Image: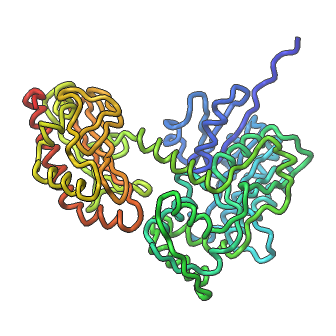
Amino acid sequence: MSPPAAPLRVLLTGATGYVGGRLLPRLAARDDLRVRCLARRPDELRARVPEGVEVVGGDVLEAETLPAALEGVDVAYYLIHSMGATGDFEQKDRRAAENFGRAAREAGVSRIVYLGGLGRDDDLSRHLRSRQEVGRILRDSGVPTLELRASIVIGAGSLSFEMIRALVERLPVMVTPRWVRTPAQPIAVDDLLAYLERSLDVELEGSDVAEIGGAEAVSYADVMQEYARQRGLTRRMVPVPVLSPRLSSLWLGLVTPLYARVGRKLVTSLVHETVVRDDRARELFPEVEPMGVAEAIRRARREEDRSFARTRWSDALSAAGRTEGWGGASFGSRRVDSRTERVDAPPEAAFRPIHRIGGERGWYFADPLWSFRGFLDLLVGGVGVRRGRRDPDRLRPGDTLDFWRVEEVEPPRLLRLRAEMKLPGRAWLQFEVDDADGSSRIRQTAIFDPVGLAGLLYWYALYPVHAWIFRGMLREVARRAGDGGEG
């Protein structure tokens, strides 16, 4: 009986990035792998990696830090680029790839897996040219390299998806240049991760390049229209022939400032087709069946909902008080207003008035306004506040509560309500109670997922009133909690 094969030793770079951060749990879950991550700030990453994953310090721009990180490694993932950096990102990408390739060869690494960008035109943008140059440098290092070339990635939190969402949500009418119609082949992040994980096992002779994409070639315009369709929005696109990628990137910086620096570099690449022209990936990865754009968007939205529902606002936001800035905070497309009160009572007493809110007892503050809001909802065909609550003292998931529905309740820790009133979006109201050294901290969070410009206008127009009501309601909840939790 032969002894079991030794686990494959894998180095993952880019574990703090979008793709690397999602690939890491998949690799760590495999019993046949031993995973090590390279990070410039290892202490920050160690607290976030799965059990059994090693984290070492190093920087691909500092060659002397790489030998120790690559020692004993069989396969190295290179998921790094300098697009978000200031200055000459091409020169930084070039130097980083040369350092890594040289160190990998000297360490005896048997394979490098690199994620690059699609595009076969001779006149590539700086971004695509740099991505493909990195692939050539790694292949020329002497280490067998598998380069996966992908178009835009669709997934919850991906840069491309966030840009599409910002444009569609905020602009009912979009002036679109010709490059919006350029063919691309978007890939769902789940499919991209499947290709990357299976790159460990595929048989190679030397280096290879595989072009990967989704099930269909579309355009940015097609992707935006599909997102709009799933959100129930009507969006009109007015084509113009004169808006250059450079001007478009400046305009993008105004509409989506959070992604301006990287987004501008991406826009200059959109004049080039990024579609799969070589079926080599089918030969190397016959088990991967990529999904289409519609399903990729559906999955991205479902993943966002699941992740958002699991968010503990006492962790995601400062526990010291409320969200900073007028209008609350932004989490993806959602708007969040959160505030806290500390009470001299155990969590069970602090949660009791929360558990008994609504119905005959009312909402503890500005009840006439709550009733007026319910009346307005009735006028437009909504549920109003006529439903009350099933039990005056207890709630369970699925219960109706005036014009809310109980989405989750975990006494004495959590109550999350989902609005069922007529709104230009989706809304939640969440209460969390934490033990705070013998007392309790109550966090109240109002969450709104606006649909289109009407939803944004609704949130910001009513924000002063909502902030006043929610502030008063939380203070009254805290007062009742301090009185022993009696409603």
Quadrant where the C terminus sits is top left
* Left or right for 96, reference 435: right
Tell me which corner region of the image, top left, top right, bottom left or bottom right, holds residue 376.
bottom left
Residue shown at the point (63%, 71%) measured from the top left: 88
Residue 484 image offset from top left, x and y in percent? 10, 26
Tell me: residue 231, above or below residue 315.
below
Residue 68 image offset from top left, x and y in percent? 69, 40
> How has the structure been colored for display?
rainbow
Residue shown at the point (83%, 54%) measured from the top left: 141
Residue 378 image offset from top left, x and y in percent? 23, 53
Tell me: residue 302, above or below residue 372.
above
Q: Is residue 438 visible?
A: no
Residue shown at the point (61%, 52%) measured from the top left: 296
Residue shown at the point (50%, 71%) measured from the top left: 235
Q: Is residue 202 visible?
A: yes
Tell me: residue 114, above or below residue 399.
below
* Left or right for 300, reference 465: right
Viewer-proximal residue among 28 and 446: 446
Tell me which corner region of the image, top left, top right, bottom left or bottom right, holds residue 353.
top left
